[in-house]
Amino acid sequence: MKDKKVILSVLAGLVVAGAVIAWLLLGGDKPVSIKPGDGVTAQINASLKNSVLQREKDGKKLWVFTVEEVVNDKAKNTAYLKGIKGKIYRADGSFLDISADKGSAGMKSNDFSLEGNIKAILNTGGELYADKITWNQDKELITATGNFKMHKDDYTATADSAETTSAFKHIKLKGNAKVEKGGE
C-alpha cells in the first residue's frame, strides 16, 4: 500500500513538473525579429546601481565617479547620477576629490553638473563647498552657485556664486562676496 502511494506521488510530481516545463517552453508569443530600417528606433533607458563612470581622452583619465545609481536617458543623451564620489584629474597631474548628492553628465561630453552637499578637495591644498557646480573640462573651470565657500592657503572666500579654475588659483565672486584671511 505504501509503495503504491509513493509511486503515485512521484508520478504526480513528474506530471506537474512536465506541465510547468511545457508551459514555459510552449507558452507565450513567438519573439519578433525587427530589421534595421523598418522605421524602428531603440530608445532604451538603463539604470545601474553601484557603478563606476569614467571619461578618458587620448588615454588619460579626465574623471572617475563611483555612484550609488546611474540612469541613462537615451533620448536626452544624459546620465543622471546619485550618491557621487570621485576624482577629477587635472592636466598638471594633481586631482580633486569630489562628492555630491546627485548630478548629470552628457554622454557625448566630458562636462558635468553636480548638486547637493558638494565638497571638492584639491590634493595640493584647497577646499570648495557649494550647492551646485558645473564643470567645463576644456577650460578646467568650475562654476559654483548657492552657499559657495572656498578655503585656499590662509584665505576663506564666500559668495552666492563663483567661478574658479580647478587649481583654485583664480576666482570670481558674485553676490554677497567676502574674502577673509584666516577663518574656517
Image (spheres, rainbow, N blue to C red):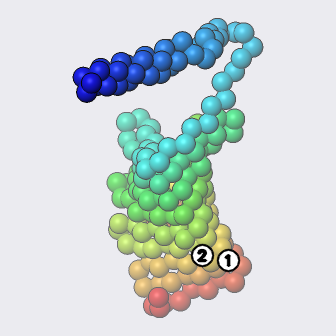
Distance, label 1 to label 2, CA atoms, is 6 Å
Which residue is pictured at 69% across the width and 35% down the height? Answer: 75
| Residue 63 percent coordinates (x, y) | 44, 49
On screen, residue 107 above or below 100: above
Residue type, mark 1 in image:
Asp
Which residue is pictured at 42% across the width and 46% down the height? Answer: 52
Residue type, mark 2 in image:
Phe
Q: Quadrant of the N terminus?
A: top left
Which dot marks residue 179? Answer: none
Going from the N terminus, do you reach mark 1 or mark 2 first? 2
Q: What element does badge 1 sit on?
A: strand
Residue where numbered disc 2 is placed? 148
On screen, residue 98 above or below 67: below
| Residue 6 percent coordinates (x, y) | 28, 25
- Left or right: residue 99 versus residue 116 is left
Q: Nearer the viewer, residue 68 or 164?
A: 68
Which dot marks residue 160? Answer: 1
| Residue 61 percent coordinates (x, y) | 39, 44
Which residue is pictured at 69% across the width and 21% down the height? Answer: 41
Name of the residue lying farthest toward the front:
1
Question: Can see residue 21?
Answer: no
Mark 2 is surrounded, within 10 Å at the Cα level, by few (under 14), some (14 to 19) or many (20 or more) other residues, namely many
On screen, residue 15 above or below 49: above
Query: Picture quarter containing residue 57?
Result: top left
On screen, residue 24 above or below 176: above
Dots 1, 2 in contact, CB < 8 A: yes
Mark 1 is surrounded, within 10 Å at the Cα level, by few (under 14), some (14 to 19) or many (20 or more) other residues, namely some
Q: What element does badge 2 sit on?
A: strand
Q: Nearer the viewer, residue 130 or 124?
A: 130
- Left or right: residue 56 versus residue 112 is left
| Residue 126 percent coordinates (x, y) | 42, 73
